[in-house]
């Protein structure tokens, strides 16, 4: 450990929470480096005169929040920093990863043409029988799975797009370069969900891990024509969302 941690048993804050927060602050400040080994439950117990259960709970919550990871038989280690995802600009996953110095990629699960069901018809005010291309991918950063993304695009604007390989290709870049399609704005909702068995297997996390569920409807440059609907599941242990709030002038 890089610094001595002060725990107060007379504090109204539970001891496990004090320990967790102290370790979290050391991780976020860089005092504890990525992949550095943390003290074991037994070492924490002996160093601070706390119970093994208290140490275990602190480490378990840090793991659940994505600050540490565990290796069977080796102990607990500091995880890579979470990726900060801004909420004010319409960018692609590829652009976001490149800006962070990471190598974007994808594993394509399926590309198919589908006919609008009741949900797509409602979202797009689509004509009966309108076709969409459905693209489902696991999004990667430096080969690590980050998100499960399912996109629906109005096929009449981008015919033939289902024949392209989106393993290392950005959908938004393809729309601009091949179809001269530019996007205007998007409406996006974000909520928390727990990874089900299928999502956990694809994203290499434990079932029940907190995830970000993001749903986005994107409009063309005319700002009136809905073009894309995206349903994404992002790893909660690798992402945190941020937004700058400005106080309105009086």
Image (cartoon, rainbow, N blue to C red):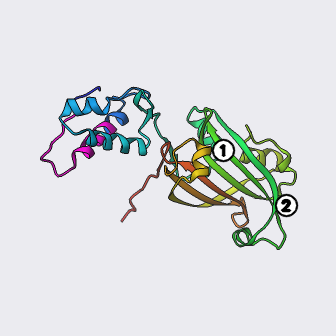
Residue 177 position, x and y percent, is: 79, 44
Q: Secondary structure at mark 2?
A: helix
Rendering coords of residue 149 (x, y %): 65, 50
Where is residue 217, by image quadrant? bottom right
Eyeballing the image, is 46 above or below 200? above
Determine the CA span between mark 1 and mark 2: 25 Å
Query: Is residue 22 highlighted in magenta?
Result: yes
Q: Which residue is mark 1?
A: 138
Which residue is nearer to you in this view: 134 or 126? Answer: 134
Q: In the image, which residues are magenta?
A: 5-24
Name the quadrant containing residue 185. bottom right
Q: Residue at x 71, y 73 (%)?
A: 122
Give x and y (percent) for residue 115: 82, 65
Q: What x and y, as percent, mark residue 94?
A: 65, 41
Crowding at mark 2 (Cα within 10 Å: few <14, some 14-19, many 20+): few
Q: Nearer the viewer, residue 83 or 91?
A: 83
Image quadrant containing the C terminus: bottom left
The residue at which mark 2 appears reads as 156
Residue found at the very far left of the displayed protein:
10
Disc tally is 2
Q: What SS does tag 1 mark?
A: strand
Q: Are the residues at dot 1 and dot 2 in contact (C-beta closer than 8 Å)?
A: no
- Which of the two residues, 53 or 246, is positioned nearer the viewer here? 53
Please state if 24 lies on the left or on the right of 126 as rendered: left
Q: Is residue 171 left or right of residue 199?
A: right
Residue that appears at 83% across and 50% down:
162
């Amino acid at each position: 450990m890089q610094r001595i941690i002060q725990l107060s048993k007379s504090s109204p804050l539970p001891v496990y929470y004090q320990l967790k927060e102290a370790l979290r602050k050391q991780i976020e400040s860089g005092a504890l480096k990525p992949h550095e080994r943390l003290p074991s439950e037994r070492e924490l117990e002996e160093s601070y005169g706390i119970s093994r259960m208290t140490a275990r709970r602190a480490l378990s919550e840090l793991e659940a929040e994505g600050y540490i990871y565990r290796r069977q038989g080796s102990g607990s280690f500091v995880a890579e920093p979470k990726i900060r995802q801004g909420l004010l600009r319409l960018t692609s996953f590829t652009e976001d990863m490149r800006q962070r110095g990471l190598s974007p990629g994808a594993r394509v699960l399926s590309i198919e043409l589908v006919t609008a069901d009741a949900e797509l018809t409602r979202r797009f005010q689509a004509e009966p029988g309108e076709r969409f291309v459905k693209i489902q991918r696991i999004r990667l950063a430096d080969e690590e799975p980050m998100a499960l993304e399912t996109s629906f695009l109005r096929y009449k604007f981008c015919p033939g797009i289902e024949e392209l390989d989106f393993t290392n290709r950005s959908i938004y870049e393809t729309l601009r370069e091949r179809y001269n399609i530019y996007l205007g704005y998007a409406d996006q909702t974000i909520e928390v969900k727990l990874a089900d068995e299928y999502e956990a297997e694809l994203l290499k996390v434990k079932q029940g891990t907190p995830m970000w569920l993001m749903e986005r409807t994107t409009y063309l440059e005319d700002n009136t024509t809905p073009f894309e609907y995206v349903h994404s599941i992002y790893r909660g242990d690798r992402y945190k969302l941020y937004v700058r709030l400005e106080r309105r002038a009086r």
